[in-house]
Amino acid sequence: MSLVFPALVAALCLTLHTSDVHASYANRWDKEFRFECPEGEVLRNVLSVHSNLMEDRRFMFSCGAAPFGGRPSTCKWTHDYVNDFDEPINFMCEPDAVLTGVDSINSNDHQDRRMKFKCCKATGYKTASCGLTPYLNAWDSMMTYNVPPGKVLTGWFSVHSDGAQDRRHKMLFCNYNTQ
């Protein structure tokens, strides 16, 4: 009995992560996606799971109010994807802007994704005292990030491994205050 339960839990987790049961994922395996926060909200949480079978990641995002009453509304997407397949992502919003959207395409030939980002500014608010997280995931493992209270997400960094066919991610976060 003691070996059956862990095997059952593992099978259930594999089923949940390889099916489309989670309607809240922004993407299906190997598919494009575009996620945008509602107007005036910012990205607050990022979760991603990896499948060795699909050699891809699925992403889940949640949004919420910006700290201290900020309502970012002057927005723009990056003109093009910020990375090539198999290349690093080194992205920062322009000064005083915060992340509010993510767009991605997948290549099965490269077993990788390219990303675009949407950043927004709020009149009278600025970003300051920024910090970079350590890597938030190991190869082939889950990644979660919850933006700390009083802070906003302003950048996304990652590296790709051809061996693991996966990415490791870091996030740039900043204080968000009135000017």
Image: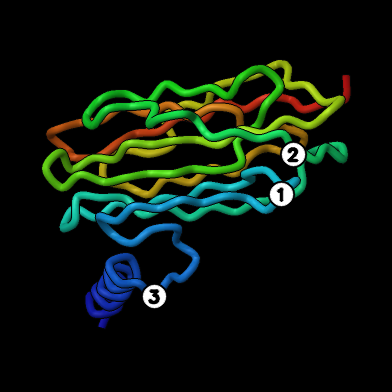
Q: Are marks 2 and 1 in contact (CB under 8 Å)?
A: yes
The extreme bottom residue here reads: 1
Q: Residues within 10 Å of mark 1 (few under 14, many from 20)?
A: some
Which disc, if any, is residue 39? 1
The quadrant in which residue 178 appears is top right
Q: Residue at x 66, y 17 (%)?
A: 95
Instruction: Give the SS element for disc 1.
Output: loop
Q: Nearer the viewer, residue 139 or 153?
A: 153
68 relative to 133 in the view: left or right: right
Question: Would you call the spot at circle 3 few (<14 residues within 10 Å), some (14-19), or many (20 or more)?
Answer: few
Find numbered disc 3 in the image and state the secondary structure of the residue it sits on. loop
Mark 3 or mark 2: which comes first in sequence? 3
Q: Earlier in the sequence, mark 2 or mark 1?
A: 1
Q: Amino acid at mark 2?
A: Ser
Q: Nearer the viewer, residue 115 or 149?
A: 115
Q: Nearer the viewer, residue 54 or 82?
A: 82
Q: Which residue is mark 3?
A: 21
Q: Give the alpha-carbon distance from disc 2 to disc 1, as whole Å.
A: 6 Å
Give amino acid for label 1: Glu
Instruction: Please provide percent x and percent y for residue 109.
Output: 11, 43
Q: Distance of mark 3 from mark 1, alpha carbons?
A: 27 Å
